[in-house]
Amino acid sequence: RLLSISLGMGQGPIAERYIMQAMEHGGWVVLQNCHLCISWLPKLEKLCEEIASKLEQDIHPSFRLWLTSMPTPKFPVSILQRAVKMTNEPPKGLRANLLRSYLSFSDEFLAACSKPDEFKTMLFGLCMYHALILDRRKYGALGWNIAYGFRESDLRVCIQQLHDFLDMFDEIPFKVIHFLIYDINYGGRVTDNIDRRTSKIILDDFICPRVLDKDYAFSASGKYRSIAPTNRDGYIAYIKSLDLVPEPEVFGLHENANITFATQESNVMMSIVSSILPRTSDKSGKTKDEIMYERASAIAAQCPELINIEAVQKQYPTTYEESMNTVLVQEAIRYNKLLSVIQKTLFSLQKALKGEMVMTTELEKMANSLFDNIVPRNWESVAYPSLKPLTSWVEDLTQRMSFMQDWIRNGTPSIYWISGFFFPQAFLTGTLQNFARKHVKPIDTVSFTFEVMRESEAQIKQNYPRGPEDGCFIKGLYLEGCRWNWSEWCLDESKPKELFVEMPIIWLRPVFNDSDNQTEEKVAEKLQEQKNEMPYTCPVYKILTRYGQLSTTGHSTNFVMNIDLPSKDPQKKWVKAGVAMFCALKY
């Protein structure tokens, strides 16, 4: 006898009754989705302890308790320690995922369609797409901004829909099938706008009329291709002939992606190893407390002074014509808040290490972070996003404060270091606001155009000592996934082992969205530029992780803006390569 229930609000007492009933009369009890009923899990833990303490004759011999759950840190450890654990995860690797899909098919299933050849060909493309988006996760943020949990059930639904639509229509409705797969079945899990763009462009290669062509290639090398329709064993034989570890080119990534993947795997392993190392002393013979005190003293000596907010407000008052004054004051307030926390906690930690005050839990965690060269959590909570280790983080903070002090002393800079802003979105809004107020237009009718400057930083400062008449110059962005070709002045393939390159200075030039304001000459000029170049809409992020909390705009809090960069290759090439720009790196 089987008793099954999906846990959720109000289902706890029913599940408890099922357990008691099966324990007395026998049978299996399946409690599904335990992660959706976190508040009831302590009660379940108590029930399991009572079952374990009962005598064998008090429990029916056929009683079994099955629990299913997604990973959650709230799941009781005692239940896991007593239980036999099984996990159901997709296999690692493109070939393994394809093989898993085709081992579940039969020749009868492959032939059970009114268009068997088309069904077999498009089914292989669909399984290839499923395997590719799963294996793409191993490249981290270069593959997907967020590691989505695509499931076998997503593929099964798509296969059934593909079968039904081929039977229902004489002509294959590629657009409808593409929409269902991208926007509903898989798209329902994809929450990031950039990831949705990536998913769509990848699917364009697998669900299209060209996929029915003979030897249609899914990759540039032609190694991964659509084979002639055959039986189940024929497809399995072809799948087994593929590389066990696929090259990045099948994902549309550069070969440097293997370095990114290997680096991530090594970092995870080394972080685990370092977490279990002894922490009593180092090779110099100093104790842990001595090391922490020295580091706290060194950081306190490096820590910049607080900004005088009142003096800044007096020097840069809020005016209608200059929104950057408000941006400067807001940035100064944010940095002062961070510096105040750093100075206060370092002073308290030094006193605690001397024994002059109580070592609280927060101070102890902070001391351990200093010892491990990690930015403490109590600093992170009021700081800007960063992946740098503590030493580099302190140097970066010093550089940011130098940028702010130069701005305060010397006036509005001709070139803005966008990496130095606590909240760069406010700076961008201020630039648009200045332009809109200058021309007496609503700010929602203004947007940016972009120009990558050919002049050096020194030349720009000489030619534009107060910056451009409209917009602003920015520097400090880094490109990942490709490089900037300085001779062709456009995006190009990365050089081997070159993961990041610094971008030239970019001019953010505001323009009106109203087409009525565009002269015929400007329209003709724009059309000519589009013929010569295919701009890539490149996302800009604060840090390399790319993901962040979703805001009301639909973008993550890590997202800054999109910048159009000139390219001689189609946009889909750079989308699949995961090309993006960043305000800061890990070092």
Image (cartoon, rainbow, N blue to C red):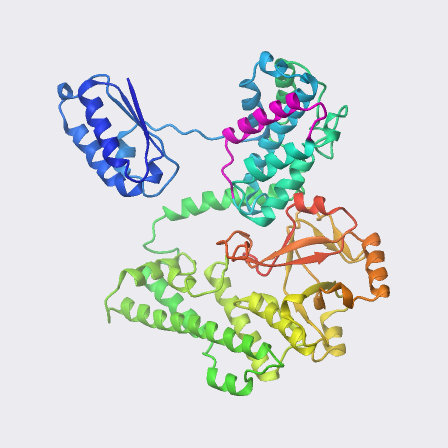
Predominant SS along the magenta part: helix
Q: Position of residue 509 (x, y in %)?
A: 71, 68
| Residue visible at 63% across and 37% down in the picture | 179
Tell me if residue 286 can be seen. Answer: no
Give the quarter of the image for residue 121.
top right
Instruction: Pick whichever, 81 or 51, lies toward us.
Output: 51
Horizontal side of residue 29 vs 381, given as left or right = left
Quadrant containing the N terminus is top left
Magenta extent: 147-173
**Is the residue 46 above or below the residue 292 in the image?**
above
**Is the residue 471 above or below the residue 114 in the image?**
below
Give the quarter of the image for residue 299.
bottom left
**In the rendered structure, does residue 167 fall within the stretch colored magenta?**
yes
Quadrant containing the C terminus is bottom right
Q: Position of residue 213 (x, y in %)?
A: 76, 25
Instruction: Pick whichever, 357 or 240, lies toward us.
Output: 240
Q: Position of residue 182 (x, y in %)?
A: 60, 38
Tell me if residue 410 can be seen. Answer: yes
Instruction: Pick whichever, 50 or 258, lies toward us.
Output: 50
**Is the residue 222 above or below the residue 475 in the image?**
above
| Residue visible at 64% across and 71% down in the picture | 442
**In the rendered structure, does residue 369 fall within the stretch colored magenta?**
no
**Is the residue 7 above or below the residue 114 in the image?**
below
Q: Position of residue 303 (x, y in %)?
A: 45, 73
Looking at the image, which residue sits at the far top?
108
